[in-house]
Amino acid sequence: MFQITYSAIFLCLFWAAGCSGNAESPNRNSVNQAAANVEISAVNDATTRNLQKEFERIAAQAKGRVGAAATILETGATVSINGNEKFPMQSVYKMPIAMAVLRAVDDGKLKLDQKIRIEKTEYVRIGQHSPLRDKNPNGVEASVEELVRLAVAESDGTASDVLFRLAGGAEPIGKFLSEIGANEIAVINTEKEIGKDWETQYRNFATPNGAVQLLRAFHERRGLSASSTELLNKILIESLPGQKRLKGLLPPNAVVAHKTGTGGTRGGITSATNDIGIITLPSGKHLAIAVFVSDSPADEATRERVIAEIARAAWDKLSK
C-alpha cells in the first residue's frame, strides 16, 4: 500500500488568436489541455525513501488508518502512504463543492453577489457546525460569495448544503471533478444526510492521491477562471479551522491554503481528522499535501499532531 512516485509534468497553454483571449475563461478540457502526466515508479532516492519511512513512523501514533500524499507541484516529486485508500472526507468535501459552484459563476449560471434564500428547513441539525443557522434561526438571505466563504473558511454545514443545491447536486459535481482530473473523490450526500447516518460519511470519500489531484487541478486553474481561483485561494488561506493540523509545526509566516474535515466519535473511535492544502515553500515552489486520519482511538491532540508532523517532515525534506 505504501508507494513513492515521481511525476514529470509538462504544461503547455497556448493563448492564440483563435482562442478566446480572455484570461478569465475557465480551462474546460482540463486533462487534455493541462498536462501530460508521466508516472515513473519506485526510484532509488534516499530522501524520498526516508520521508516515506518518516510518514509511516508518524502515522503509527494515530493507531488507526492514516493516508498521506505530498507532492511538489512544479517538479512532481511525490511521497505517499496508503495513497490509493479511501478515507471519509467530512468537510474537506466543501472545497470541491465550492469549486463546482464557482464554475457555475464562471459559466454565467450564477453571480457572486446573487442573493440566495435559505429557509430554516435547510439548516443542518444542532450539533453540526453552522454559524449561519445559529445567527439566523428563522432563515436568511446570503450571497453566493458569502456562502462560499462560510462553507470553506468557517466550515459551515448549512452553507455547504446550499452550495450543493446550487451546483445541481452530486451528479454535476462528479462530472466537474472528472473533467478536471480529480477522479478519486466522491461527493454524494449533503451535510444534512451525513449527519443522520454514521456510515454515509464513508461514501463521501477521497484517496490521498485523489485529494492531491484536486489540489493540482486547482493550482493549475483547471476548470476555473483566474478570478474564481484567486477568490477561493484567498478564502482557503483565511480558513479558520485546523490551526494545529497542516499549519501546526510550520513557520508562523508560512502560507497555507487548506481545508480541514472532522468526523464524530463513536465508541471511542473518531472517524475523520483531515487536512488538505497547498503550502508555499521558501523556494517559491508549492507543496500539495493531503493527510487523512481515520477510525482512530487517539485523542484530538494526537490526531492533529500526526497531521502537523507529516506536513513538517514534507516541508523539511521536499523543499530542499
Image: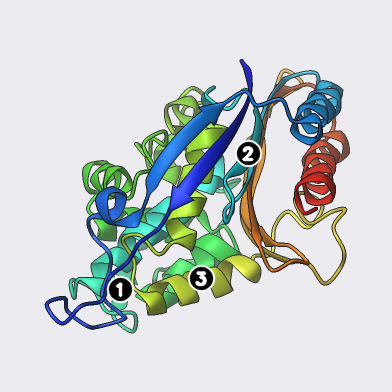
Q: Are marks 3 and 2 in contact (CB under 8 Å)?
A: no
Secondary structure, mark 3, is helix
Residue 53's image quarter? Answer: top right
Q: In the structure shown, which secondary structural element does the residue marked by tag 2 occupy?
A: strand
Label 1 to label 2, Cα distance in Å? Answer: 41 Å
Residue 83: percent from left, percent from top: 58, 27
Q: In this view, does 306 lie above or below 148?
A: above
Residue 154 horizontal/vertical position (percent):
60, 63
Q: Which of pointers 1 and 2 indicates the residue nearer the eye? A: 2
- Give 298 or 305, whichever is nearer the viewer: 305
Where's residue 219, x and y in %?
49, 61
Give the CA separation, mark 3 to mark 1.
14 Å
Q: Which residue lies furthest to the left in this view?
A: 18
Q: Which one is in front in this view, the residue at disc 3 or the one at disc 2? A: 2
| Residue at which label 3 appears | 149
Mark 2: which amino acid? Thr
Label 2 belongs to which residue? 78
Number of residues whose C-alpha sits closer than 10 Å to that of mark 2, classed few (under 14), some (14–19) or many (20 or more): many
Mark closest to the chain's N terminus, 1 or 2: 2
Give the label on residue 116, or none.
1
Closer to the camera, 90 or 36? 36
Q: Which of marks 3 and 1 is in front?
A: 3
Amino acid, disc 1: Ile
Q: In this view, does 62 lie to the left or right of 285?
A: right
